[in-house]
Amino acid sequence: MTPEPPYRASVPYREIGDGVVCPRCPNGHLRPLTYGSLIVHACETCGGVFADRDVMERVLAGDVAAFRDLAAEATRAPPRPATSPRDLACPKCQSLMKPVRVERAGCIVDVCAAHGVWFDRWEAHLIADAMSDAEANATLRRALR
């Protein structure tokens, strides 16, 4: 018998109102994934992940193992075609997020300074791996100010 994984999936996050819809693909819906007290919101369609400010503070402080596990769970399903809007809206407030290039991770993430960071499929893994780099960490800290 296989032990239960430490994360769990549940119904779509309703408290973010219109933010239930994925910012990357309009047919995707965000659902919370939890690992202990860490919660991210993942799209079942494209594998993207939204991490709010509290989660990002923990990741920036070095708590990346649980974040990496949640990102792995979010990207487990095979990707389905998604639209690729250039400007993404924050899933919480619907304002446009700012694209931020994290050189060490080799990717561009979308940041809502008030609410959190959107990671396209696999970007959360790249960011988790880059968080030991002071410059990558500082780039995200500045973007979240």
Image (tube, rainbow, N blue to C red):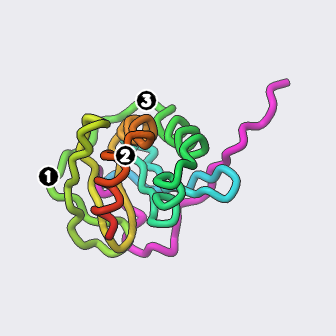
Q: Main secondary structure of the magenta part?
A: loop
Whether tag 2 and tag 1 are in contact, CB under 8 A, the answer is no
Looking at the rendered structure, the secondary structure element under dot 2 is helix
Give how far across and how far down residue 48 sits, in percent. Answer: 38, 45
Q: Counting residues from the N terminus, which is met first, the one under dot 3 or under dot 2?
A: 3
Q: Disc 1 to disc 3, how far (Cα)? A: 23 Å
**In this image, 41 relative to 105: left or right?**
right
**In this image, 102 relative to 56: left or right?**
left
Q: Nearer the viewer, residue 137 or 82?
A: 137
Which residue does the numbered mark 2 point to in the structure image? 134
Checking the image for residue 78, the label placed there is 3
Give how far across and how far down residue 86 sits, in percent. Answer: 14, 52
Which stretch appears magenta? Answer: 1-25
Q: Disc 3 to disc 2, how far (Cα)? A: 33 Å
Query: Which residue is drawn at the image coordinates 28% and 62% (left, top)?
Result: 143
Above-or-below relation of 129 to 48: above
Above-or-below relation of 45 to 90: above
Neighbours of disc 2 within 10 Å: few (<14), some (14-19), many (20+): few
Q: In the picture, residue 30 is in which quadrant?
A: bottom left
Looking at the rendered structure, the secondary structure element under dot 3 is loop
Q: Amino acid at mark 3?
A: Pro
Neighbours of disc 3 within 10 Å: few (<14), some (14-19), many (20+): few
Above-or-below relation of 7 to 61: above
